[in-house]
Image (cartoon, rainbow, N blue to C red):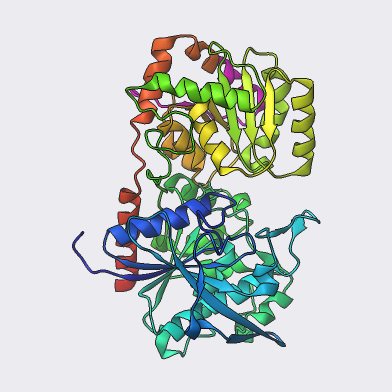
């Protein structure tokens, strides 16, 4: 156990692996608390109990004294209760609380978007106001005052704001500090100003100075203004959002005003989940000394996608939310040229319906070269990481990105654009880097991406060069230990401040 003061930390998140996941936030929410626990801190996690969470499988149970909470959202009085369980994937037991309300969470299989309408739920402001206020009521009821409440993204960004406004006079919260981590500034949690009213914050905070941004209620801005410290998920992305207002919808001013209280901490990887030597979701385990076993995974992957296996053909993969900021527009535009090359491409993801249509059609027309799975599938994601030769991640912006790190550790060479966390984690091939781990390009054009794929094919055909690149990548160290220590230092600083 590391020396120094041990903190009580409440980690508040809208998704949590393995219970419920749509993106990297779920992975971080599971691994960071485990590492902090390892360092000796007492961490508890709170997440909504969505209908998609399997309560039986995860032994999520009622707690008698955590029933019958009541809060008002504007004129409405809303009841909720809190259920309890533990992270199942941990060496250290991490307590998880599930905020339970049938109407706002239990009835919803999907987290933020109404799948039938392909649009955000119209009551997301109510849902996440309830969650944020509920979290504070929960710790009060438990009589457990954390040293730090660590909120994540817009869904929980109201928590720091509520502590400093609605709960300002509440003795219970007088020593509680807040940290807000923003995993992606593209999602601000913007709503009509009526959303302000149900937060319960006094009217004086209903202004551009605090919670309103360009005439709209903005949850993220409220969090940025009121949190004692704001972080984002890589140093590179931190610098970019300060320099380019378009990445935050104009929150750069508020972020700049934080000064030293806005920092970038890179995410780590949970090696108990992402490790080709032990991964139970892949066909054959391997490590840096048994790379040949990787090809059993390649064969299985290719056949599962209905393509024909030929080890002399390089396989390129994409696992992504299918949105433009992930560079999917670039990929889509490059696709006709990519399909002229002697490669195979597999894609896993969901997102914009126009891309669903495009990729389905491409798979029909080019059935020997391109295949896709348009959905969310964690098991397949592991097999893709193990079975591909190259991984494409041409993001326009990327706060951190986890898949490029999973790729490196699985001996799958990433091809990434030089942005945010990608730039911080993949070492490109140029003379100044003795040990490159991937291909890094800057220009955001389809031609640049096609150019990288051609270079990749050349490397693939030179076995020594390919093996060296793979091995460099597999030697990368993305352990959470380092990052968790940075968060622990941060809590120390914030608590002292
Ligand atoms: C978001 C970001 C991604 C990051 C992840 C975890 O999904 O878009 O870049 O890796 O959060 O922090």
Q: Residue at x 70, y 73 (%)?
A: 103
Does any portion of residue 212 appear in the rendered image? no
Image-based side of 476 in relation to 157, left or right: left
Image-based side of 369 in relation to 408, left or right: right
Q: Residue at x 43, y 16 (%)?
A: 466
Residue 428 belongs to magenta span = no
Q: Residue at x 34, y 44 (%)?
A: 479
Does any portion of residue 409 appear in the rendered image? yes
On screen, residue 22 above or below 447:
below
On screen, residue 56 above or below 158:
above
On screen, residue 98 above or below 169:
above
Image-based side of 39 in relation to 318, left or right: left
Image quarter (top left, top right, bottom left or bottom right) of the N terminus: bottom left
Bounds of the magenta segment: 433-454
Image quarter (top left, top right, bottom left or bottom right) of the C terminus: bottom left
Q: Could you say which is closer to the camera, residue 346 or residue 170? A: 346
The quarter of the displayed image where residue 229 is located? bottom left
Image-based side of 14 in relation to 180, left or right: right
Residue 157 at x, y = what percent?
55, 68
The quarter of the displayed image where residue 462 is located? top left
Q: Could you say which is closer to the camera, residue 51 or residue 213? A: 51
Residue 438 belongs to magenta span = yes
Q: Could you say which is closer to the camera, residue 1 or residue 255? A: 1
Residue 349 at x, y = what percent?
65, 40
How many dots with numbers?
0
Residue 209 at x, y = what percent?
59, 73
Which residue of the protein is positioned furthest toward the left in this rendering?
A: 3
Residue 42 at x, y = what percent?
32, 68
């Amino acid at each position: 156990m590391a020396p120094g003061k041990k903190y009580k930390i409440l980690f508040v998140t809208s998704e949590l692996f393995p219970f419920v996941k749509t993106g990297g936030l779920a992975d971080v929410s599971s691994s960071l608390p485990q590492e902090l626990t390892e360092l000796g801190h007492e961490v508890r996690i709170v997440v909504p109990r969505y209908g998609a969470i399997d309560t039986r499988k995860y032994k999520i149970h009622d707690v008698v004294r955590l029933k019958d909470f009541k809060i008002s959202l504007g004129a409405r009085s809303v009841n909720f209760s809190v259920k309890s369980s533990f992270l199942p994937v941990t060496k250290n037991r991490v307590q998880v609380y599930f905020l339970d309300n049938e109407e706002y969470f239990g009835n919803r299989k999907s987290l933020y978007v109404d799948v039938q309408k392909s649009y955000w739920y119209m009551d997301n402001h109510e849902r996440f106001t309830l969650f944020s206020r509920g979290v504070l009521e929960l710790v009060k009821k438990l009589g457990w005052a954390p040293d730090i409440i660590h909120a994540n993204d817009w869904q929980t960004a109201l928590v720091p704001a509520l502590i400093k406004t609605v709960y300002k006079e509440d003795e219970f919260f007088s020593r509680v500090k807040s940290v807000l981590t923003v995993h992606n500034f593209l999602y601000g949690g913007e709503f009509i100003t009526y959303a302000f009213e149900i937060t319960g914050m006094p009217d004086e905070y209903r202004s551009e100075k605090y919670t309103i941004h360009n005439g709209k209620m903005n949850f993220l801005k409220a969090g940025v203004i009121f949190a004692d410290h704001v972080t984002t998920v890589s140093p590179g992305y931190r610098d970019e959002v300060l320099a380019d207002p378009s990445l935050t919808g104009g929150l750069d001013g508020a972020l700049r005003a934080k000064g030293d209280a806005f920092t970038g901490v890179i995410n780590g990887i949970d090696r108990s989940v992402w490790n080709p030597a032990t991964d139970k979701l892949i066909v054959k385990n391997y490590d840096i000394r048994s790379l040949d076993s990787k090809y059993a995974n390649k064969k299985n992957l290719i056949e599962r996608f209905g393509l024909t296996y030929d080890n002399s053909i390089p396989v390129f993969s994409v696992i992504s939310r299918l949105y433009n900021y992930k560079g999917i527009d670039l990929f889509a535009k490059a696709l006709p040229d990519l399909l002229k090359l002697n490669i195979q491409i597999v894609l896993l993801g969901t997102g914009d319906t126009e891309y669903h249509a495009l990729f389905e059609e491409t798979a029909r027309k080019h059935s020997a070269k391109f295949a896709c799975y348009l959905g969310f599938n964690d098991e397949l994601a592991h097999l893709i990481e193990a079975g591909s030769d190259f991984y494409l991640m041409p993001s326009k912006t990327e706060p951190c990105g986890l898949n490029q790190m999973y790729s490196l550790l699985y001996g799958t060479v990433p091809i990434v654009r030089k942005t945010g966390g990608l730039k911080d984690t993949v070492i490109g091939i140029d003379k100044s880097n003795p040990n490159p781990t991937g291909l890094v390009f800057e220009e955001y054009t389809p031609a640049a991406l096609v150019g990288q794929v051609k270079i990749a094919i050349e490397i693939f055909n030179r076995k020594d060069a390919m093996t060296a690149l793979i091995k460099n990548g597999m030697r990368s160290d993305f352990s959470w230990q380092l990052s968790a220590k940075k968060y622990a230092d941060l809590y120390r600083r914030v608590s002292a401040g």
